[in-house]
Image (tube, coloured by chain):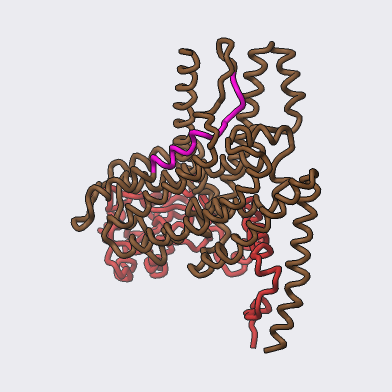
Chain colours: A brown, B red
Amino acid sequence: MDTVLIVKAIIVIAIFAISMLMALYETYAERVIAAFIQDRVGPDRAGPFGLLQPLADGGKLFFKEDFIPTKADKWLFILGPAVAMSTALLSSAVIPFGDTIIVAGQKIDVQGMDVNIGILWIFGIVSLGVYGILIGGWASNNKYSLYGAIRAASQTISYELAMGISLLAIILMTGSLSVKSIVLGQHGIDWNIFYQPMGFLLFLTCSLAECNRTPFDLPESENELVAGYHTEYGSMKMGLYLFSEYVNMFISSAVLASLYLGGFNYPGMDFVYSKLVGSFGEVTGHNLATALGTLTLFLKIFFFIFLFMWIRWTLPRFRYDQLMNVAWKWMMPVAIVNLIITAAAELSGKPLLYNWVGLAIFGAIYFGLFPIFKKKTVSAN
Amino acid sequence: MTLTNRSRKTDNSELSIVENTYFPGIFKGMGVTIKHFFSKKATIRYPEQKRYLGPVFRGHHILKRDEQGRERCTACGLCAVACPAEAISMVAAERVKGEEKLYREEKYAASYEINMLRCIFCGLCEEACPKEAVYLRHDKFVPVFTSRDQVIYGKDQLVEDMNDRYLRDAWTKEDMAKLWIKQ
């Protein structure tokens, strides 16, 4: 029991450290990717290739004046960034970063905890995350901050619906709320994205909105609201907000990879597993295979982080009415249609085939029949 | 009238049902950005990489010597008069016997000073000089100074070194055109 506890503690601390490290280097990656897309070279002065730049930025944030406006609610003002950061870090607890490792004859999950409602845990924590922004923006006693906070709240609420419904389709397929069993259900290359292409697109869009990233960065749109909810923040409080955004991005990428791209599964994993066990023995081989799986998961996470940044430096921001239109008039209905198609496909017994058939029928109706109706209404006018 | 054929008319027509999903636009935009991601970068990393500024760049001053290594300057003072910033001052002296190898004419500048805090690098001294003695180099900057006693440049910093003579890359329009073709 003691070894299990110690190994678990090590895994939890490692996940915490990795989330922080990822957030640190996401800031660097963001700047470099932005620079490359704009034909520049980006930060390259601090250390080789500018790799020490995040440390320099962090040091700068620590030495800046920690300012609290006189009219601000002092305790809520301090609580805001704390809530944002802690909720961002909490949600990584249920993400399986690997299969199992064998230590002293016991199989231990490479995961903070394997709760049977894992995905609900993530959703609960992510919904709490908006409180950090809301409290911070409200406590600042500044109209721009308040606008940012309100926008963040309404946006998160709107997009959580479509996200939840597209997730329901996944739960329908797996029959479990545990993230671990969802990942284990996608063995090899049997990934959910092949069953749920539309659900994947919906979930991707919604996670962009949940992370408050462009094209959904209305809460902190600098050309409308100064800096949105963190207008009044400076020093490390501001740093915590920015940091929590990047941690959220890492977690969203991990969730996306686990739910749709098969987490730590990769094609040919059984073959690799048997080879490794054959040449290194039962224990070492198993642990090496798990490490390979973790590496695959991280490659997928890097891919999503790159995708998020790529999207950020490509697309302009939505207008507020467009944001709400997309959420309520497009993504919600499409998510519901997706759920119905998945349910029918699951009942048919051949989910892969009938999911695509269902999507094809939906596409044909939408793109084929709707324009005819539209023309009629136009001519009637 | 159109000057180029690059301008495009604004399309105000309603979006079609496919365009309304935003996907064609998004994929097009992502294609543009990924193309730039892998393209050559425009940045010049300055202190390590320097780009050629052209033969007419006005940089560090130089007092030329002639082919035999004699100073050309005769301390006539025209450069000091032409200088709009009054940065140049000089003291004239008469050449004595035995100094024919050092100075070209009977009068020379015993001291010639340019105050680099005042100099605006306009090049009027170069234009005013009747003896083709003072030039602004195209290939060398006046370095950054950090204290006032580094500011006044005397003859020791200005007179040309015969082992490392200064040559301008192009003097005429034709030379210039050739230089551009070569670049």
Note whether residue B46 is visible. Answer: yes
Residue A164 vs residue A199, the one in the foreground: A164
Say which residue appears at 58% left-offset and 59% top-offset.
Answer: A314
Query: As drawn, which residue projects farthest toward the front?
Result: A347
Q: Is residue A63 above or below residue A35?
A: above
Number of numbered callouts drawn: 0
Residue B64 vs residue A340, the one in the foreground: A340
Query: As drawn, which residue projects farthest toward the left?
Result: A70
The image position of residue A90, as x and y in percent, is 44, 37
The image position of residue B73, as x and y in percent, is 37, 59
Compared across the picture, whether A368 is left or right of A223 comes to: right
B5 falls in the magenta region: no
Q: Is residue B59 above or below residue A235?
A: below
Magenta stretch? A85-101
Residue A7 vs residue A34, the one in the foreground: A7
Q: Quadrant of residue A328?
A: bottom right
Q: Is residue A94 above or below residue A70?
A: above
Considering the image in quadrants, where does the C terminus of chain A appear? bottom right
Say which residue appears at 56% left-offset and 45% top-offset.
Answer: A305
Compared across the picture, whether B33 is left or right of A24 comes to: right
Note whether residue B149 is visible. Answer: no
Q: Quadrant of residue A256?
A: top right
The image position of residue A343, as x and y in percent, is 70, 50
Q: Is residue B22 above or below residue A355?
A: below
The image position of residue A344, as x and y in percent, is 74, 51
Say which residue appears at 47% left-offset and 56% top-offset.
Answer: A157
